[in-house]
Image (tube, grey):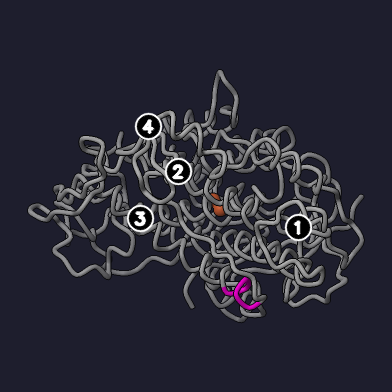
Amino acid sequence: MSADTLTETPESVPGDHFVEINTDETIPNNVALTSDKQLQRALETWRPKYLDWWQDMGPEGFQTSKVYLRTAVGVDPAGWAKFDYVRMPEYRWGILLAPKVEGRTVPCGRHKGEPAWQEVPGEYRATLRRLLVVQGDTEPASVEQQRYLGATAPSLYDMRNLFQVNVEEGRHLWAIVYLLVKYFGKDGREEAQALLERRSGEADNPRILGAFNERTPDWLSFFMFTYFTDRDGKMQLAALAESGFDPLSRTCRFMLTEEAHHMFVGETGVQRTIEATCNAMNRAGIKDPNDVEAVRRLGVVDLPLLQRKANFHMSVTRDLFGGEISSNAAESFSAGLKGRFNEANLKDDHVLADATYPVERVVDGKIVEEQVPALRAINARLLDDYIKDCQGGIDRWNKVIEKAGIAFRFTQPHKGFNRRIGEFGGKRISPAGEVLTEEQWQARSGAWLPNAADMTFIDSLMKPCREPGAYASWIAPPRVGINNQAGDFEYVKIA
Ligand SMILES: [Fe+2]
Ligand SMILES: [Fe+2]
């Protein structure tokens, strides 16, 4: 099963494959925390500050409600989690690494084939620390972005999924903080503190990456975010899972298991929105998806609006990959600190001294493809892999529309559309890939990105629905319950 298709089926309840993980400790872990007193003390000092952050910046309200959550209790894919009612502040945030692979070697770059590092190589200390901080910063950021959504959840099922994603992003922060504190001494402890101090969207001390300072103001944004932006997380974690620094690789491999669920929430959330729209259109005998007024009167989201929302989230997420051509990315790869997506399965020399890679750029007002040294195009390649990876869910959304007999298809806009960073940063590119003048862009972009009227309409739909088994008008029920629970299961016992 690929990580992507991982859903919350009976496969993810405990089997008999427990890996020694001490869940009785304050900090559940499988890294023998009690045998490293200094590390244990450092993490136990950080923990109350983390809990303060969670109270201040985690989900608004519902902190005393009992939520049917999955908690990681092991790292075996066959039995890594258990489900139970938990109050979020009492969630068992722990440190879990995938099992060590004996004989693992550095998979890429100038150290390729050398034994993977169990300690930080001194010469790469600063680069590695930066990689960890940038990744770590995204984890609490998304919790902050999503903190007001509980109040308008379209069902208890969705509310529970939101909180599940939130506690797991919290756990991802723990995962990165563990590496910082264990391997980077005083610097690492300072970074761990700073991760709790930056705030999404705050002018003085924002989160590091742009998309993580955007608002997630409504549930459509949440579903688009978990489908498109958590998928950036997947790509970054997959590339870091190829790291020659073995503790990072093992950390990321386990984080990917959790990440798959976030993308599942996003994909099915959008899909259920589409289902509600198509069903309502068919019941009302509306055939034309562009008859927006009529569709909106049914209390569902018109498909062109969903496309505009998707366009926005795709474009801001693509910026997260950084400049397509990057000497920093070349150095991280050559140092063996970060690989490519699927590095182990790629059929080349994994050193890339002479290889090239095609990169699209704007030259003299035209988009052209140029061969660039592959080392300098590591980000370009990861972005291309990401765009391919996005397509699966989009195809499944289109199947739902096709089955409903409605003539509409979701597409991915051109890579250069609405970009702020990299080769297309500041250029005006249409979804179809035409280079536009500023004037043309101003005249046409309202049809491609959510406009003020769209946001007002979405806002009008965001009414809470808290009856077990009931769903807001704009979203269909899921096909299967979490952990196979019945349709009217009370996923959140609201206090
Ligand atoms: Fe995460
Ligand atoms: Fe995530």
First in residue order: circle 1 vs circle 3: 3
Query: Pointer 2 and pointer 1: residues touching (CB < 8 Å)?
Result: no
Q: Position of residue 79 (x, y in %)?
A: 59, 75
Q: Any atom of ligand 2 within 8 Å of the CB at mark 1?
A: no
Give me the C-alpha separation between circle 4 and circle 1.
33 Å
User: What kind of element bears circle 2?
Assistant: helix
On whether ligand 1 comes within 8 Å of the CB at mark 3, the answer is no
Q: Residue 389, position in %: x, y?
A: 43, 63
In the rendered structure, which segment of residues is drawn in magenta? Answer: 399-403
- Residue 401, magenta (yes or no): yes
**Rendered location of residue 191, percent (x, y):** 47, 31
- Give the spatial CA distance, label 2 vs label 3: 11 Å
Q: Which residue is mark 3?
A: 239
Asked whether the residues under the numbered discs 3 and 4 touch, taking CB atoms below 8 Å apart as contact, a structural biologist would say: no
* The label number, if any, that marks residue 437 in the structure image: 4
Name the N-terminal-most of marks 4 and 2: 2
Asked if residue 156 is positioned above or below residue 367 in the image, the reply reads below
In three-dimensional space, the C-alpha distance between marks 2 and 1, rounded to whole angstroms, equals 40 Å
Q: Say which of marks 4 and 2 sits in front.
A: 4
Horizontal side of residue 348 vs 467, given as left or right:
left
Residue type, mark 3 in image: Ala
Q: Nearer the viewer, residue 58 or 119?
A: 58
Element type where label 3 sits in the image:
helix
Q: Is mark 4 within 8 Å of ligand 2?
A: no
Q: Which residue is mark 1?
A: 295
3 vs 4, front mark:
4
Earlier in the chain: of badge 3 and badge 4, it is 3
Q: Identify the residue shown where x is 33% and y is 60%.
A: 341
